[in-house]
Every structure is written in structure tokens, then in C-alpha cells.
Amino acid sequence: MTNGRQQIRAVGITLGIALGSFVVGAIFLMLVSQALSAVGISLSDRPALRLGVSTVLLQGVTFGGVALFYLQTRDIGLEFIRVRVPTRRDIAWVTGGFIMLLVAVRALSAIIAYLGFDHASNQIIEVGREEPTVFLVLIPLSFLLVGPGEELLFRGLIQGTLRESFHPMRAVVLASLIFAMVHVFSLQGSGKLVYIGVVFTLALVLGVTYELTDNLAVPALIHGAYNAVQFGLAYYTVTQGTAL
């Protein structure tokens, strides 16, 4: 197989993994919703509960399960995922990466506002406007499920798989693009391309830190901390009665 064909195959496989994970997650959510409905608990009219259940099922169960299943089918084992207990150097990278994410999102937000572009909103924000306690629940879940789950799938598995056929930095770019594209499923309103562009930029930071530290725990902690801060600020903003 030529190098070009290997690269096309790698992109196809990783796209399939990403999209397939969301399909599997949707199926799990449907089955769990039906099981809860059978005992008198409806998720359709309880969006906050539905969001919590979907977070656990998608980032916690599905993303991790799909990654582990794929590693097993390829018979390459967990060593494919480069992860270890963070060292002092890793903690320094976590701190620097977290600050870089905050600076990047502030700069991008200023540019978007200056240019007058519309910016789509995430469904989580819409649910949180109605029930702000959702944000408080999502703060610990950011560290326990969202950060680890998404980084395991998109950086550990998808970026790692692309790295086998592409230069590491090209693998970072492609994995970040896939990560950004799949976020379209959770968006509402106009300005979706702008939102995807912001997510892509932030994903680049996560991908680069994984490559430079060789430790998945670093982007997982950065991702979790960033999300937790955003949810904390969203809770404060909504409860203080100001616009997000």
C-alpha cells in the first residue's frame, strides 16, 4: 500500500471512529432513556437530567469503550496510549496549556466580536440558562469524564492513529479538525463555522501538548480545567442575571 493510500485509510478510519462513537452514544442514550421511562423517569421533559446522563454515557462510557474496543481489535494494547502519572514538568505544561487556552479564547472572542460574526451556542449553555445547577454538576464531570474521555478518544486514539501515517504535527492538525467538526452535533443557532473554528484552535493546543509531553494526562487535565472554569463562569453569569 502506497503512503498516500495509507494516509487516506488513516483519515477514513479515524473519521469513522469519531462519528461511530457519537452513533453508539446516541444508541446508549436511547436505550437508557427507554429503561428509565419504564420505571417512570422521563428524560424528554427533564433536560438537565438528560444532559447529565448523556455526559456520563458519551464521554464516560462510549468514548472510553470505543477506544478500548478498537485497541483490542487491533491487538496493540493500552501501551498505544501514552499516559503516566504527571511529573512536575507535566504539571508545568498543564498550567501553561491552561493559560494558553484562556488567552486564545479571549483573543478569538475579541476578534469575532470586532468582525461582527455570529457565534453559535452549545446546547449545554441553553440547558444551563433554564437550570443553572447543571453547570455545577458539570464542573466535577469535566475532570472525571469529559476531559479524560474526549482526550482518550481524540488525542490518544485518533491522533495516535493518524501519527502512524502522518508527520506528528499534521496528525495534530487532522485530529483537531475531526474534534472540531463533530462538535457541530451539539450546536444551536447561526455561526456554527465560527464556533468550530474556535474549537479547532483550542484543540490544537491540546494536541500539541500531548505530542510535546508524551503524556495524555496533560491534555486531559488542561481540557478538564478549561471546561470547569467555563462552566463556573457560566453559572456565575446566569445566576447574576447577566447575559452570557
Image (cartoon, grey):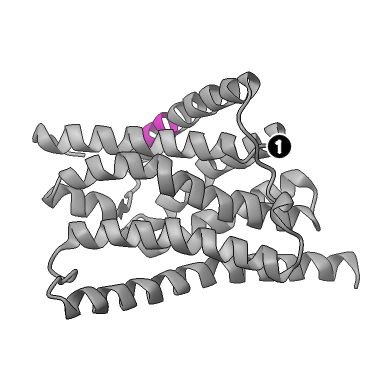
Q: Image quarter for residue 15?
A: bottom right
Q: Position of residue 88 (x, y in %)?
A: 61, 19
Q: Which residue is mark 1?
A: 214
Direction from residue 129 to residue 204 in the image, left or right: right
Q: Residue at x 62, y 41 (%)?
A: 216
Relative to 186, residue 16 above or below: below
Relative to 175, residue 96 above or below: above
Q: Position of residue 108 (x, y in %)?
A: 43, 35
The residue closer to the viewer here, 79 or 130, is 79
Relative to 92, residue 162 above or below: below
Q: Position of residue 213 (x, y in %)?
A: 69, 32
The tally of labels here is 1
Label 1 SS: loop
- Does residue 189 appear in this view? no
Question: Is the C terminus in the top left, top right, bottom left or bottom right quadrant?
Answer: top left
- Does residue 79 appear in this view? yes
The residue closer to the viewer here, 191 or 2, is 2
**Are there few (<14), some (14-19), or many (20+) residues within 10 Å of tag 1?**
some
Q: Residue at x 60, y 71 (%)?
A: 16
Q: Which residues are magenta?
A: 105-110
Q: Residue at x 23, y 37 (%)?
A: 234
Say which amino acid is labelled 1.
Asp
* The magenta stretch spans residue 182: no
Q: Residue at x 76, y 66 (%)?
A: 75
Q: Position of residue 200 (x, y in %)?
A: 52, 47
Relative to 68, residue 216 above or below: above
Q: Residue furthest front?
A: 39
Question: Is the N terminus in the top left, top right, bottom left or bottom right quadrant?
Answer: bottom right
